[in-house]
Image (tube, rainbow, N blue to C red):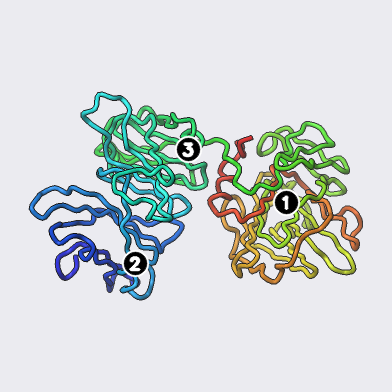
Amino acid sequence: MDNQGNHTVQRTTDGGNTWTQIADFRAQIPAANDYFIWKIYTPETNGDYLLVHLLTKPASTLWPTDNYLYRTKIANDPNAANVIASWEKLFVPANAWLSDVEFDFDPNIVYIANSSSSINSPNLNGTGMVFKVDYANPTLFPNPYTCPPNICRDLTQNLPNATSGDDALAFERGSNGGLYFATDFGLWYSNNATRALGNGWTQMARNLPHTRYNGLEINYINNKIRAASFGRGVWEVDLQVGCVEPPPGLALWLPLDEATGPTAVNKAAPPPGTHWGGPTPLPAGKVAGALCFDGVNDHVDVLSYANIDFATSDFSLDTWVRRNPGAAPSVDVLIDKRVESGGQVRGYSLFLYLGQIGLQLADGTYTNYLSPASVPADGLWHHVAVTVARGNPTGGLFYLDGQPAGPPFNPTAHQGSLTTAAPLRIGARSALASSGSVSAVLHGCLDEVEAFNRVLNADEVLSIYRAGVYGKCK
């Protein structure tokens, strides 16, 4: 409460010793109305965003009559007055009790769950239970309790006509828009692909008791979702698994599923890869088949084309790699597209140096960037990725098994063109003039080699890793 007895939002930066008011909703609510704050929500990906579920009612009545969201994007601004002035009203699609609000990776995209459908309806399916709303531009949502088609979508589809408790919705990071929704008729799951079919929800864990659930929590360590029931304990079940849709900007995709050589299909563009030196197909790779390299002269070349040159643009590279157990310390190249001319090197290379993940950027001069994380030579599959926002001093990020692998690196010293006519080579170093035709050959196997002409965000990298053996949808 503030000094006038109104509900407000306060923050602390010293463990609760002192508090500062950062909201004044009384100034935004008609004087004839009362209001109260029910819940506050913040996304995992951006702590500057806060959403408040606020209810209003005429002062003469007992029960609230209207539901709204209010948002600030600068919750951590040191000047509290700036935060107070920044709150904006967001209309919601239905004037119903909000049981939960979840955020996509983009904090402007919000999933809203309502606590009930129509309990008096004879219909078996619910109405207006889950919505997806893009609040990037709130002016496109001019009227309350509507669902403008360009920015709002009703995701209820085949959900049962049921009620839901607080914290009843969970958005699965690193998935294809996976949503879990707990109702008194069980736990339900859908994702972008299933919802696109129009009948997208599947009931999970059919042995759950028919009762109210007041909390869903995803445990990413053991790939479980946990549901807290009203008086019937906490239940857990495995997360749904399946292939993930390829992220946008796919410039190269070598699944390496072929049972024989010499061709490696490129599912992103016409030029395929060609086996050289006799790399060995592996029928049971990480995702279907894979390709193994002998550490001597095996490699695959893909003829150059514009989308994998990257020129002066941002890019991302990723692959599954399995190092041979006990492999001797060496330089093992994963993806390489470089050329040396007149003492100048141009292009890019993703490699392992004594197991450490590394990237070389070369625009005439070059720098080798190393992650502190290493891929172990344990005979197991590990996912390696790097994303490069070339004009950003903290724009370089390594990933190992879906997680950031060390602090960001600064790629801005090499913003010149990376374009070369050299083939893109996997499993060995490009044919640099100073090193002969084949060197730094991988002692191990590769699967699902990819390049993107944009920066993948952390959730997109995680989604590729978490898809595991299912890989990307083909």
Reading the image, the residue beneath label 1 is 307
Reading the image, the residue beneath label 2 is 86
Q: Position of residue 125 (x, y in %)?
A: 33, 28
- CB under 8 Å between discs 2 and 1: no
Three-letter residue code for mark 3: Asn
Question: Which of marks 3 and 1 precedes in the sequence?
Answer: 3
Question: Which of marks 2 and 3 precedes in the sequence?
Answer: 2
- In this view, the residue in front, 34 or 465, is 34
- In this view, the residue in front, 441 or 83, is 83
Disc number lying in front (1 or 3):
1
Q: CA distance from mark 1 to mark 3?
A: 30 Å
Reading the image, the residue beneath label 3 is 191
- In this view, the residue in front, 283 or 154, is 154
- In this view, the residue in front, 284 or 415, is 415
Question: Which of marks 1 and 2 precedes in the sequence?
Answer: 2
Q: Give the residue at x 15% y 57%.
A: 34
Determine which quarter of the picture holds residue 86: bottom left
